[in-house]
Amino acid sequence: MKKPIIIVAVGVLVVGLFIGGGYLFLKGGGEDNEEGPAPTAIQSYPRLAEDELTVEFEPVSESKGVSINLTISDFPRGMESFEYEFTYVGEDRDGNMVPQGVIGSPTLASELKGGKYIKKIFLGSCSKNVCVSHAGVESVRVLIRINYEDGGVKVWEKEFEV
């Protein structure tokens, strides 16, 4: 008669451990975890001072909207390549002010003409030769990422008025 009682007791103990372990596992290992999971780290790079790179930003009003004449020169020594990013708030087709942006393709130092990069950048979107301007743009944040021959990276950043 003792065997059935022992079997039942062991069964209840195993079920209790299973339920308790599952509860602790789902709750986060029994720790007080009110803050949720740890955020993913975002890569941050050292910054270049504003005077370590020459950036000319010239807004040009055209019939199709606003373009920016961008000239970058006086690149730091040891640069292998660079890329740029424009971010701004502009009006979409429905008249809503929404975040917009332009990302430039990486450019090798060997591709620069006379040590300068010159590009005309349209603040809008184009598809099948039809361009739609982003109206209402007041300022543009320009971020330039410099990739060095030794593997290092630095960024230059400034906000320009349009």
Image: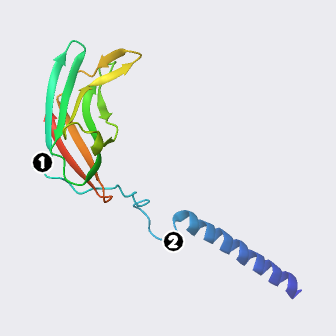
Residue at 15% in and 46% down: 53
Answer left or right for 57 relative to 78.
left
Farthest residue to the top: give it. Answer: 63
Q: Position of residue 25 (x, y in %)?
A: 57, 67
Residue at 31% in and 60% down: 150
Quick check: 49 above or below 121? below
Q: What's the CA distance linking mark 1 and mark 2? A: 50 Å
Farthest residue to the left: give it. Answer: 51
Answer left or right for 159 relative to 134.
left
Query: Residue 28 versus residue 140: which sits nearer the camera?
Result: 140
- Sequence-wise first label, 1 or 2: 2
Q: Position of residue 79 (x, y in %)?
A: 25, 51
The three-letter amino acid code for the residue at tag 2 is Gly
Q: Which numbered marker is on residue 19?
A: none
Which structural element holds mark 1? helix
Answer left or right for 152 relative to 59.
right
Quick check: 162 above or below 75? above
Residue at 23% in and 50% down: 155
Position of the N terminus, as image quadrant, is bottom right
Q: Position of residue 34 (x, y in %)?
A: 41, 62
The colouring scheme, among rainbow, by chain, secondary structure or one colour, is rainbow
Which residue is the site of mark 2?
30
Position of the C terminus, as image quadrant, is top left
Which residue is the site of mark 1?
50
The three-letter amino acid code for the residue at tag 1 is Glu
